[in-house]
Image (cartoon, coloured by chain):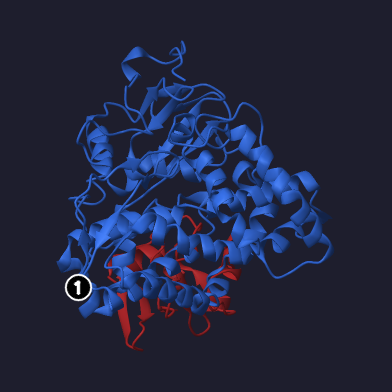
Chain colours: A blue, B red
Amino acid sequence: MTMPVPDHVHPSLVTKFDIFQPSRPDEEYFAAWVRFQKEAKSQLLWSPLHGGHWIATDAELVMKLYEDSDTMSSRRPGIPVFDRDIDMGALSRDPPEHKAFRKPLNFSLSPARIRSMEQFIRAAVRELIDHLIAKGSCEFISEFADVIPLNVFISMVDLPKSDLDMLAGWARAITHPTAAATSDGPAISREQVMDALGNYLRPYIAQRRLQPGSDAISEVVNSLVDGRPMTDAEAIGACTHLMIAGLDTVASFLGFMMMFLAESPSHRQELVSNPAIMSGAIQEMIRRFPLTVNSRIARDEQIISGIRIKQGDVIALPTMLYNLDERKFPDPLSINFARKVNSQCTFGNGAHRCAGASLARLEIEIVLQEWLARIPNFRLAPQKLDVVGGIVASLRELHLIWQ
Amino acid sequence: MPDRENIRVLFTLHQGETIEVSALPGQSIRQVALDNDVLGIVGECGGSGACGTCHAYVGGQWTERLSPPSEDEQEMLEYVLEPKPNSRLTCQIIVEEAIDGLEIIVPDHQF
């Protein structure tokens, strides 16, 4: 979907950089972002790919535009933009309308609620490690990273476990638009996925309006909007948001984290011998592996960093360009558990900041604790590591070996 | 009279120890905490009130003496771990002469 460069974009601002396939041959995924940022001659560059969009290249600008709901709209999230208005609950609404849809998420995903799930998650993690440990090796993505967060999620929303693969496939078709458009992904458009998700969710929503449970879908669909019940269309959108945002981000992160730990015995040793550093270590790894490239739409014509933006222009906000900016974090690709990470962009920022950050962090903590307690030494099997870029970047496969 | 350039803030840490640091007018308490390596106050959204990870409790009479939290802050405070009547987001408390001697109690966990 390469588009002609629009008239208001000066040719000097056009880049060949592809946000979904940033790497040159043999260039590591995150290193590609660092290189792109260093080479960027302007705080905004225009890419004609994926329907045509700006890329914010400056760390502070990325953070600022995430926060700025006054001039930046989230009504059409994702790149390329959908060919029609779609309802994804809080994700596709701007403040103040956004608030009513965000509130049930804040409630379902609050730190206190999440802490109450700790035992359940820990038991699931232990059970899966017990199952894998005797094998001496695993393909971590499909056998572990995809399994734990998805099972936690499916129990939070109380949907049948047997539907997991189908739901995860749909979520990936949204978060990996390029892969979905090629042989890599399901041959289904994102618009078709949205329709399929709506049809799938409709009977569950109807049922949970009649008999509400304590699951997140019940909480979302029975919450009020300006004092009135949600319409069916709004409820479907709000639940679609849960599905899209909840399904593959933690799985992707776990893959990158274990890839790193497999290659660094010293970092593993630090975690095993000094559990007190766990919280800071997780914070540093969350900084080091920002996965998402979200986007905003310019509400009006405006000047940003001296560049004219037209109403409706799409602006990609790569979280990598905050977390891996060497002016923010010296030697940004190195992982230093003692590093002070006082701000980071992995969860975005502002009104749309990830509502599930506490859940993500708890899952990561439990996986680290339980895995290192049972399998303190592991390494990469010989393999070519392949990152699938997208709205959420992930490793295609990760083969680990232990004794 | 407090020194205008040296406003005192007292942080009670996890171990129960209290440290006194000096702060400059205009800074947020979150920033003061970070500048003085006070562990347990994060604020990973960078101090915009969007994440709830710079949560702390204010001590003594300070709940009444500070200007009250905004509606947005109050809402965010509903979702922090162990909210109490004296909970605040430290990124939303700005240092000024009137807060000289402010007592901040760092919570055990942010997440």
Which chain letter goes with mark 1? A
How far from the left and from the top, in percent, is residue B28? 41, 62
Please report the residue visible at 47 percent of the width from the left and 73 percent of the height from the top: A124
Q: Quadrant of residue A128?
A: bottom left
Residue sitting at the far left: A266
Work out whether residue B26 or residue A367 is closer to the camera in this orientation and state it.
Answer: A367
Q: In the rendered view, would you say A226 is above or below A297?
A: below
Neighbor class of circle 1 (other Cα within 10 Å; few <14, some 14-19, many 20+) is: some
Please report the residue visible at 37 percent of the width from the left and 33 percent of the height from the top: A19
Q: Say which residue label 1 marks.
A: A270
How far from the left and from the top, in percent, is residue A380? 21, 57
Please say whether residue B57 is visible from this viewpoint.
yes
Q: Is residue A257 left or right of residue A382?
A: right
How far from the left and from the top, in percent, is residue A160? 64, 61
Q: Quadrant of residue A12?
A: top left
Quadrant where the C terminus of chain B sits is: bottom left
How far from the left and from the top, in percent, is residue A319? 38, 45
Q: In the rendered view, would you say A83 is above or below A136?
A: above
Amino acid residing under circle 1: Glu
